[in-house]
Image (cartoon, coloured by chain):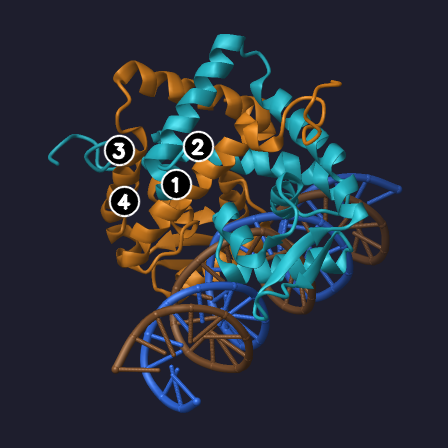
Chain colours: A orange, B cyan, C brown, D blue
Amino acid sequence: MSGARTDTVGTYPIKEKTGFTLAKVCKAHRARVGALLAGYGLHVGQEMVLVELWHEDGLRGGELAGRLGVEPPTVTKMLRRLEGCGLVERRRDPSDARSFRVHLTNEGRALEEPVARCWEEVEEAMLAGLNKAQRRSFRELLIRVRSNLDPEFGAR
Amino acid sequence: MSGARTDTVGTYPIKEKTGFTLAKVCKAHRARVGALLAGYGLHVGQEMVLVELWHEDGLRGGELAGRLGVEPPTVTKMLRRLEGCGLVERRRDPSDARSFRVHLTNEGRALEEPVARCWEEVEEAMLAGLNKAQRRSFRELLIRVRSNLDPEFGAR
DNA sequence: AGTATTTAGTTAGCCGGCTAACTAAATGCG
DNA sequence: CGCATTTAGTTAGCCGGCTAACTAAATACT
């Protein structure tokens, strides 16, 4: 509290917080994935939409937003671009005229394997030098921290 | 390859990768910090500029970019906004007419403690239920992973 | 049935990020 | 000295995010 240093504020500087390192790690991870994805004409973040559709095709816009943990306007814009790239297709839902369903095109489906390889490559780089126990521990800690931070993640 | 499941691609789905959880955790952390920072008129990300200046005032634009791990145009725009908010001040560097130094205003300096409290609050929420050993382990794993992913972090 | 309310998406506009292309000043070098 | 090169920032424009405000369709309710 009344220590010799004056550039801290009670606890310790933001730069030394775990959350700070977390943010930097995430930034680096995103950059690495993004660099690989660019080879397929994808921007980082867009692959998440595809991930959801690979898991379940024909989702409605709102469902997509919910699963991505993203707001509807974000989905609107991303779908417009993905549709422009020919990876995805919007079909009006006959049972609800203000809704639509998002379907993968063949091009969109074809990206599943290469995108998974991109993620796998970065995953391996990230965990290099960690043994199985460390990897498991890291994974479990992240899951716990996620349930602490993400309200949508409580019902898991 | 010729496995029974067709919705995976050799290893396991992206959704089950550690990097995926990492991204979600980071997103949640960012959202939480952002919500608190909004109370001080700050957008999440801007506080990082202030963090660097609290640590060392009078940095040049390029140094700021380097320390933040961000490209120069990003700094240009952020500084324009922070200057507009009166948190920061740009003074031309007399020894180099194409450069300038960024200085905190009193308002900018005054935010150090409240912003640190925001971060501390989210830090505590994030690590809730973890004992000291787990927190240390999490921190150390993140640091290792960071050095694996971030080229600028090797020289530590 | 007819109106009020809720729900689904869109538009506009802001912010933090990026790349590409540019200006202008400092430095290197013949 | 004078020109070429490097370095520092800016501008323009794209993308993933967000909020606020809107349209239009479905549902609820009197």
Q: Nearer the viewer, mark 2 or mark 1?
A: 1
* Label 1 – label 3 distance at C-alpha: 11 Å
SS at badge 1: helix
Quarter of the figure that contains the N terminus of chain A? top right
SS at badge 3: helix
- Few, some or many residues within 10 Å of mark 3 (<14, 14–19, 20+): few
The chain identifier of the residue carrying mark 3 reads A
- Asked if the residue at tag 1 contacts the one at tag 2, i.e. Cβ–Cβ closer than 8 Å, the answer is yes
Give the numbered dot on residue B136. Answer: none
Q: Nearer the viewer, mark 4 or mark 1?
A: 1
What residue is drawn where x is 19% and y is 34%? B10
The chain identifier of the residue carrying mark 4 reads A
Q: Amino acid at mark 3?
A: Glu
Percent coordinates x, y for residue A128 in the rendering: 26, 29
Name the residue tied to disc 3: A124
- Seen from the viewer's position, the closer of residues B32 and A111 is B32
Q: Along the polypeptide, which appears first: circle 4 or circle 1?
A: 1
* Label 2 – label 4 distance at C-alpha: 16 Å
Q: Along the polypeptide, which appears first: circle 1 or circle 3?
A: 1
* Label 2 – label 1 distance at C-alpha: 9 Å
